[in-house]
Amino acid sequence: MLANHQSKNYYYYEPSHYRPIVGDMIVDRIFHNGQKNFGVLVTKDNVTEHLQKLEEELDIKGSIE
């Protein structure tokens, strides 16, 4: 039986395999200018800033748990 937090995951089967709904969201975002709150365009000009932001988010989550 799956752990409680695993059984409630709507978007992923497990950490590296997303469900079809996520694939649809990715295609919609890339080709149809979908949800603005889904995904980030990472370029050579903003990659460092983006990685720093992700590290800060992980630090914040780690301090909460």
Image (cartoon, rainbow, N blue to C red):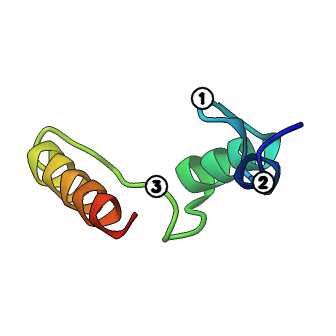
Mark with earlier residue (3, 1): 1
> Of the residues shown, which amino acid type is indicated by label 1?
Ser
Mark with earlier residue (2, 3): 2
**Left or right of 10, for residue 61:** left
Q: Residue at x 27, y 45 (%)?
A: 42
Residue for badge 3: 39
Residue for badge 2: 4
**Left or right of 25, for residue 3:** right
Q: Are marks 1 and 2 in contact (CB under 8 Å)?
A: no
Q: CA distance from mark 1 to mark 2?
A: 18 Å
> Of the residues shown, which amino acid type is indicated by label 3?
Gly
Residue for badge 1: 16
Extreme residue toward the right, this view: 1
**Left or right of 36, for residue 17:** right
- Front disc: 3 or 1: 1
- Assign a secondary structure to mark 1: loop
* Quadrant of the snapshot with the N terminus: top right
Q: Are marks 3 and 1 in contact (CB under 8 Å)?
A: no
Residue 2 image offset from top left, x and y in percent = 83, 40
Residue 52 image offset from top left, x and y in percent = 13, 52
Residue 49 image offset from top left, x and y in percent = 11, 54
- At label 3, counting other C-alpha atoms closer than 10 Å, the crowd grade (few under 14, some 14-19, many 20 or more) is few
- Assign a secondary structure to mark 3: loop
Q: Is residue 50 above or below residue 34?
A: above
> Of the residues shown, which amino acid type is indicated by label 2?
Asn
Extreme residue toward the top, this view: 16
